[in-house]
Image: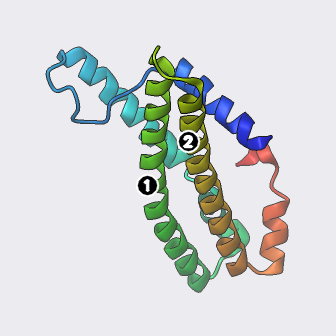
Amino acid sequence: MRKVILAISAFMLALILPAIPMAGEHKEECGGARKGREMMMHRMEGMHARHAGYTSIVLSRAEEFKLSDEQLGKILRIQQQHRTAYKAIMEKLHKSMQAGYKEYMDPNADEAAIRKAAQEHASVFNTLVEEGLKERKEVNAVLTPAQKAQLLSIKRGDR
């Protein structure tokens, strides 16, 4: 059931958001459209930097959690390792969304092809979730029980 919901969500996003070509594509378009897309990509990168994930929450509260230098080093290495993986997964996610959107918008595409594209997109999204859970587990392994308790006491809105 979750996969169906993820697939539907992915295609709803594809319907809501226009297909945005990657940087460098459609160089012949007018400067205004390219500049607008560049501004949007910059905003998305800024959002990613602000919401970089679980590890960022821990690192942003390093003093509060009294992380040792050794812990900080380990957590920073974990973050760097996963950042590389996230980048590759996000590229695949973007491509699968574009492929799904293309299938959906093709009047000649049959439902099976559209569903297959949705399943592929959901599969890549699941990979992203698994990577995030793996990172979270690795970070938690570095923390002491007292630090984990502090982390668990953070309210959702305080991130």
Is 128 situated above or below 136?
Answer: above
Q: In this view, does 60 lie to the left or right of 107?
A: right
Q: Tell me where residue 26 appears, x and y as whole percent.
A: 21, 26
Query: Which residue is most to the bottom?
Result: 70
**Residue 7 tag number:** none
Q: How is the image coloured?
A: rainbow
Residue 156 screen position, x and y as percent:
79, 46
Secondary structure type for disc 2? helix
The span from disc 2 to disc 1 (Cα, nearest Å) is: 16 Å
Determine whether label 2 and label 1 are within 8 Å by CB: no
Figure quadrant of the N terminus: top right
Residue drawn where x is 78% and y is 64% of the image: 151
Which numbered dot is residue 87?
1
User: Which secondary structure lies at badge 1?
Assistant: helix
Residue 53, by quadrant, is bottom right
Comparing 110 with 121, the one in front is 110
Q: Where residue 100 sits: x, y (%)?
A: 50, 31
Q: Mark 2 points at which residue?
A: 121
Q: Which of 73 and 40 is in front in this view?
A: 40
Q: Residue at x 69, y 75 (%)?
A: 66
Identified at 27% across, 17% down, the residue is: 33
For label 2, the crowd category at 10 Å Cα-Cα, with few meaning under 14, some 14 to 19 and many 20 or more, is many
Quadrant of res 21: top left
Residue type indicated by callout 2? His
Mark found first going from the N terminus, 2 or 1:
1
Position of 127 with respect to 153 (left or right) is: left
- Label 1, residues with CA under 10 Å away: few <14, some 14-19, many ≥20: few
Q: Which of marks 2 and 1 is in front?
A: 2
Q: Where is residue 146 in the image (x, y as percent from the top left)?
A: 83, 76
Residue 60 visible at all: no
Q: What residue type is labelled 1?
A: Lys
